[in-house]
Amino acid sequence: MSLSTILMTVFSTTLIYAAPLIFTALGGTFSERSGVVNVGLEGMMIVGAFSSTVFNLSFGNVFGAGTPWLSLLVGGIFGLLFSLLHAVATVTYRADHIISGTVLNLMAPALCVFLTRIFYNGKGQTPVIDQSMGNFTFPGLTNIPLLGKILFTRTSLIAYLAILVGGASWFFLYRTNIGLRLRSVGENPTAADTLGINVAKYRYMGVLISGALGGIGGAVMAQSITLNFSASTISGQGFMALAAMIFGKWNPMGATGAAVFFGLAQSLPIIGGYIPILSHVDSVWFQIAPYAITIVVLVVFLGKAVAPAADGQNYIKGK
Amino acid sequence: MEKDVVQMKNITKKFGNYKANDDISLELKQGEILALLGENGAGKSTLMGMLSGLLKPTSGEIVINGKSVKMENPRDAKTLGIGMVHQHFMLIPAFSVLENIILGDEPLKAGHINYKQAAKDIALLAGKYHLKIDLSAKVADITVGMQQRVEIMKALYRKANIFIFDEPTAALTPQEIDQLMKIMRALSDEGKSIVFITHKLKEIKEVADRCVVIRMGKVIDSVKVAETREEALAEMMVGHKINFAVDKKETNKKETIFKIDKLNVEAHGQLKIKNLDLTVHSGEIVGVAGVDGNGQSELIEAITGLRKIKTGIVVLNGKKIQHQSARKIAEAGVGCIPEDRQNVGLILPLTISENLVLKSYYKKPVSNKGFLNYKKINEDGRQLIKNFDIRSQSEKELVGDLSGGNQQKVIVAREISAQPELLIAANPTRGVDIGAIEYIHEKIIEQRNAGRGVLLVSFELEEILKLSDRVVVMHEGQIVGEIDPRDTSSEELGMLMAGKQLAE
């Protein structure tokens, strides 16, 4: 295999695995910027993956090749609805954010596998979807010498979209007044309140956006990687996204970059075999790698990164 | 005569059964600086909370610019042109100064914030009112004085005509206070009206036109500042004649109660106390003067067992007490009013009576076979609240909900009621109002008159000179001089504190 083919494989595999993480890490960023800790990303991804797969299986013959894209939308909507639980629990009823998020993580797989058994004749996993997200070659850009082949040939369109969403999220949070207000309630809700900013409204917004993006992230996972839904479709990606968010310092651009890095880590088991120097290494190491890297990154960066000042603090309005 | 911009008519505010404001009426004229004077807990902040939309009156009427208004939230107050400069700044440290100012009222251009326009508008206002602020700096990086100017700018940016300053000088340096006074005068010259909440008489004399005195939720009087003496204001505030002199009985120095010999203490790898000797006799207050950071904190921590002693001997009543646990030292008879009352002296989310038994909860009769006797705890709490004049709703009120002065009284009550042989008082009156200061001073002198030893560590020279029988000066971990407070001026003491020897 030529070097450029290897690079193309590494690159496209990385992007394919990065896409779900980017969406979900961005989701986490919105929630935590508004001051609500979101360890429930994993659960939101599961709901997104499940709902999108069911939609795809049910309507694949109606919408044809457009089905996986519509499935993402469906995943986003159900992720948003699911995250409503987290918002109500933490913002309205002032529950502990970690506990509420953990409830989501425990509830989602149980609920979704249970529904899978009901919908698909008692089986623990759904059938494989017919209409999946394939790879994509950018017309025109592919002709750029060298880079065209590595970056733009047989690659992941959704990953590029995810990076665009990352840029848009940054603009939203750091250049618009709604973004400024959303961040203000995550930093000092009391101060925001004295300026007439509705703390609960912006925190709901943060959590619901995170649910939608987390749902889309889970849907991307199901539509482009696992191609069905089972208990193991989402196996820690939500936590990797959380790690990416922290690694990226709660900044959308940072989270996007970090998610691409974790995508590379996740793609190691697949690309390891293609890279000549690494092909002798036992594949078990590659399979452990994403999780090990996540833990190492968290240990090294969690202490140093500065979270929003009021992240995880419930706001109680004065009488 | 200027018109009234604010009229508060017969305002009453109740929290449960407690009347924080009782039938208060006041008016504010255009361009006037009105001082609102009262002790901590007198109801000043509650009253202004209602004017700024944070609280709703139980009964009464608020009239702004001739119109009766009902404010539901701070935004309503803002719309009426009322701007509050909070005592604890309402700023976001992670945001820039500019972002802090425009938050909630951002100028927009094509869907995004027009930072340029905002910066231009604010620079214009800053020039007009001489408010020096650095718009691009992060709030976390600027001085307290500038943070306050940012708060003022927030109100100006929202076109406020009525300013409420809630104890604005509490955290400022003397130079910053001067600047603030200038800004307040500039605001009033432009026709803006100011309510200035404070319990510092000097500042009222300096800047205010009129002063309304509030005590226990009621208006005591409204006076013209120029025609009223400071002493008269102080009396109105606390409700009785202020005893500026102290009542110290002559005591014969008796035996040595407490002795430190060649003490060395390290902190953060540095020697903070160097070969320090110190003696306290019974019936004596020894003042430790010194600039903050010269080892005073380490000295107190070492004596009370919170910090390891490197070498040296500490003796109380003939018994060595060094290298023992804080509990053992307290039981041996050392009481301490710590300098950081909220973090060291109290547990804010616990009730008053729980805080009062923090040093005795493990002993009979409060504790019986590991079970707490809450009936006894609360009974004792009620007694101490009465004896030490702690203003509170009940003994079950959380200490975190009390005013600073009353929090300090809780500590004083706990430490003194344990009848210590040696009482250490570290800045016992910092951030406390005049009435409480007088009270705490009285209690400290009572200890002395009862033949106990007192070690008073304070940054307030006046306090040291007033209370102490003997003053030692601490500089870089050593005692660099001892003076007699009766024939030493603050200037001489200040020289010693700066590390200079007095010319004989």
Image (cartoon, coloured by chain):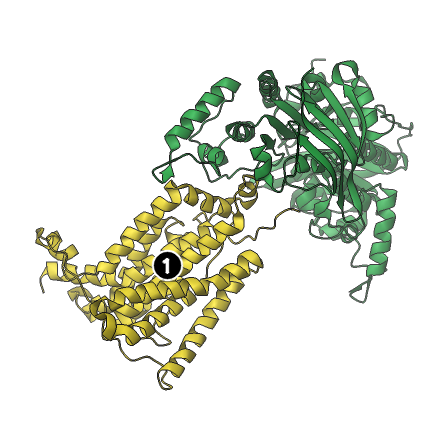
Residue A220 is at least partly visible in this image: no
Instruction: Name the outermost residue toward the bottom.
Output: A121
Q: Position of residue B218 (x, y in %)?
A: 80, 33
Q: How many marks?
A: 1
- In the image, the chain rendered in green is B
Q: Which chain is yellow?
A: A
Element on which disc 1 rests: helix
Tell me which chain the residue with mark 1 is part of: A
Q: Camera-side residue: A274 or B451?
A: A274
Q: Is residue A238 left or right of residue A227?
A: right
User: Looking at the image, which is closer to me, A160 or B311?
Assistant: A160
> Relative to the observer, which residue lies in front, A67 or A270?
A67
Relative to B252, is A191 above or below? Answer: below
Q: Position of residue B137 (x, y in %)?
A: 44, 31
Q: Quadrant of residue B196?
A: top right
Looking at the image, the residue that sits furthest to the front is B67
Screen quadrant of the N terminus of chain B: top right
Tell me the amino acid under the disc marked 1.
Leu
Name the residue: 47% across, 72% down.
Answer: A107
- In the picture of the structure, the residue carrying the numbered disc 1 is A213
Residue occupying image coordinates x 78% and y 53%: B396
Q: Is residue B307 shown to the viewer in this render?
A: yes
Vertical position of residue A6 compared to residue B22: above or below? below
Q: Is residue A160 left or right of residue B86?
A: left
